[in-house]
Amino acid sequence: MPARRENLLLAALPQEERDRLDPFLEWGDHELKQVLIEPDEPITHIFFPYDAVTSTIQEYPDGSMIETGLMGVEGMIGIQLWLRMPSTPTRTIIQVAGQGHRMTTNDFIREIRDNAASPLNPLIARYTHAFLSMTSIAAACNRLHPLDQRMCRWLMLTYNRIRRDEFPMRQEFLAQMLGVQRPTVSITAQILQQAGLITYRRGHMRLLNPPGLAAGSCECLELMERQMDRIFDQPWRGLIEEEDRQKV
């Protein structure tokens, strides 16, 4: 695993292929709430997050919304384009600010999607399956499991991808992601605080006990993460921990 800051899909490529793609990849910062994909608008870039986390959101005419997918260092944003769809009805935004690479649509189509020889295509196929599995599990989870377990699951999915225990987070945004009203999220967050799992104040979330949050999550957390493991034929969280150690 290379020591540079790298999305895991890119890090899994043979060095020759990674070098070939390098001129088409642009490294940059991604700000909180930045919109990466607008609903029903042409997808202009593909994104490979490093320590940013994104949310794919389904919005409704009455203004309500719910998160249907969450992406980070293990994947990419723009799988619809790889599936030969130029747009999608959902919105994808930056949930936690961070950095990563991006590639223009034209470069992605020419250099990767329509290039049968690119080793990135089989990895994207595996990631697409994992992401679609995640959305199915999330739909069942939102219907079947109590909010405290879902909130623990959501916080751990985010923590696993950013590898830090503090990040900006407004309760209104968290309520939208979980598909509930803000007062309900406030009560649940207070319960987690009283249990010593988190602290939350003035739009800032801190995870005090990640193992405790994992234990408080429903089984969907590990179901989702195991799907991501299948992309790389090994636990993906171990890969990113190894990369982080090499940078120290």
Image (cartoon, rainbow, N blue to C red):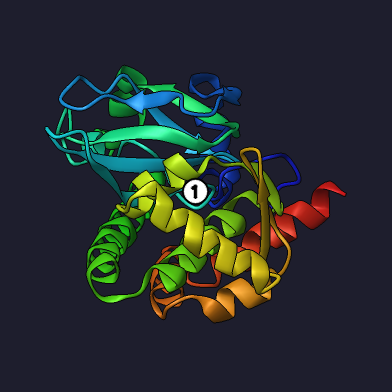
Q: Is residue 144 above or below residue 135?
A: below
Q: Is residue 130 above or below residue 226?
A: above
209 and 63: which one is in front? 63
Picture quarter with the N terminus:
bottom right
Whether residue 232 is visible, yes or no, is no
Residue of label 1: 9
Label 1 SS: helix
Whether residue 169 sits left or right of residue 135 in the image: it is: right
Whether residue 6 sits left or right of residue 120 in the image: it is: right
Please name the amino acid that badge 1 sits on: Leu
Q: Is residue 95 above or below residue 104?
A: below
Q: Position of residue 227 (x, y in %)?
A: 38, 69
189 and 108: which one is in front? 189
Whether residue 116 sits left or right of residue 229 in the image: it is: left
Q: Name the outermost residue toward the left.
A: 61
207 and 130: which one is in front? 207
Residue occupying the point 48% across, 26% down: 102
Residue occupying the point 66% across, 75% down: 211
